[in-house]
Amino acid sequence: MTRLSDFLRYTLDKDPMKRVSLRQEIDALNLYLGIEKLRFGDRLRISFDIEDAAYQGLVPSLILQPLIENALKYAVAPREEGGHLRIEGCVRGKTLGLAVQDDGPGLAANIMESNNGRGVGLRNTRERLAVLYGDHNCLTMRNAQPGLRIEITLPYERAAQL
């Protein structure tokens, strides 16, 4: 209950158009993933591969949460053995790269080509990125071996040091 309360408080406090450091975003995701770990137990495996510089980059608040929610819904929940989620962050020159990859079945070619993805979460994420960054962002998805990989590229802006 405490994790749920903390996560709900965080979501209510954050303006969806506000940007936070990737470290803050990961802390919020860990609240959410803690709740999901209770639900899935050992069936949910999570790993992070985030460069130190990426943690300092600014990202839209809760930008990764709907991508992770989709991965849980389509790659982990339907499979008896569960699944693995990998969350990545890196800085390449003037860009911040983020990725969420699962080890599920991926997407059928016709869905991938239509660019519809996995529902409302992906569409909302694209729209938020367009409003905040205009043409200076990229959201792509591709089937990986195994699973689905969603990548976001943003201009790298470093959060102010506290």
Image (spheres, grey):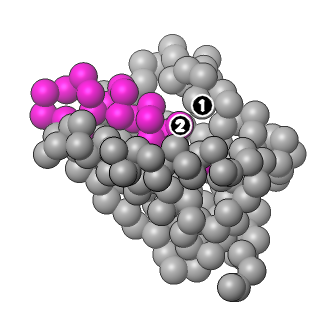
Residue 23 lies, in percent from the top left, at 54, 69
Q: Is residue 146 visible?
A: no
Image: magenta residue range: 62-83
Residue at which label 2 appears: 66
From the viewer's side, name the closer residue of 86 and 36. Answer: 36
Q: Is residue 72 magenta?
A: yes
Task: Indicate left or right for 137 with 123 as reference.
Answer: right
Residue 9's place in the image compared with 90, above or below, is above
Tag 1: amino acid: Leu
Residue at label 1? 122
Note whether residue 45 is visible.
Answer: yes
User: What percent of the width, then of the height, locates residue 55?
Assistant: 56, 73
Q: Quadrant of residue 96?
A: bottom right
| Between 74 and 41, the one nearer to me in the picture | 41
Does 58 sit above or below residue 43? Answer: below
Image spot of residue 138 (x, y percent)? 70, 46
- Mark 2 or mark 1, which is nearer the start of the sequence? 2
